[in-house]
Image (cartoon, rainbow, N blue to C red):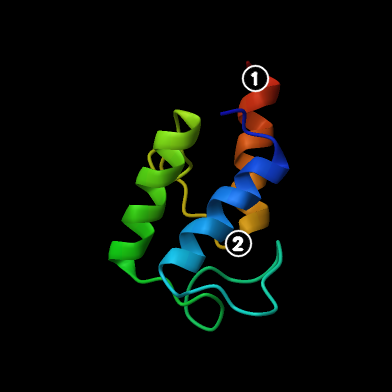
Amino acid sequence: MTSSPASVEQTVRGFLSSAAKLPDDFDASTPLYADGAGLDSLETAELSAVLEDDFGTDPYSEGQMPQTLGEIIAFYDGAAAQA
């Protein structure tokens, strides 16, 4: 799957929905942790695995800890620019 912003957003939204963590007002600036989607460490590891499976890499495996969907999208935009 290509890592277009729409496909990354769809993957993250799908994961959050399946984990029952998708806030009604979720957008690119909603925090993934605490007061936002409320992901815990296990769910973060699962999100990392989903992103790795779908796109071949993920920000978590690269030592980053994105706080929002926007930061995840920016990671893939940066990776595409380097390819």
Residue under numbered circle 2: 68
Residue 62 visible within the image: no
Residue at 41% of width from left, 43% of height from top? 63
Residue 73 visible within the image: yes
Q: Can you give x and y, in whole percent of width and height, for residue 8 in the image?
A: 61, 44
- The three-letter amino acid code for the residue at tag 1 is Gln
Query: In the figure, residue 81 lies in which quadrant?
Result: top right
CA neighbours of label 1 inside 10 A, class few (<14), some (14 to 19), many (20+): few
Q: Can you give x and y, in whole percent of width and height, for residue 45 in the image?
A: 32, 54
Residue under numbered circle 1: 82
Task: From the viewer's perspective, tell me whether residue 76 is left or right of residue 40.
Answer: right
Above or below — where is 49 with respect to 69? above
Residue at 64% of width from left, 41% of height from top? 7
Task: From the viewer's perspective, tell me whether residue 10 is left or right of residue 35.
Answer: right
Q: Can you give x and y, in whole percent of width and height, for residue 18 in the image?
A: 43, 65
Name the one closer to the observer, 11 or 39. Answer: 11
Q: Can you give x and y, in whole percent of width and height, for residue 49 in the image?
A: 35, 44
Residue at 48% of width from left, 73% of height from top? 33
- The three-letter amino acid code for the residue at tag 2 is Thr
SS under mark 2: loop
Name the one closer to the observer, 1 or 65. Answer: 1
- Measured in 3D between alpha carbons, the distance from the residue under mark 2 to the one under mark 1, in whole angstroms, is 22 Å
Q: Quadrant of the N terminus?
A: top right
Above or below — where is 62 with respect to 43? above
CA neighbours of label 2 inside 10 A, class few (<14), some (14 to 19), many (20+): some
Residue at 47% of width from left, 54% of height from top? 65
Q: Cβ–Cβ below 8 Å for labels 2 and 1?
A: no
Q: Which mark is residue 39?
A: none
SS under mark 1: helix
Residue found at the very far top of the displayed protein: 83
Earlier-in-chain disc, 2 versus 1:
2
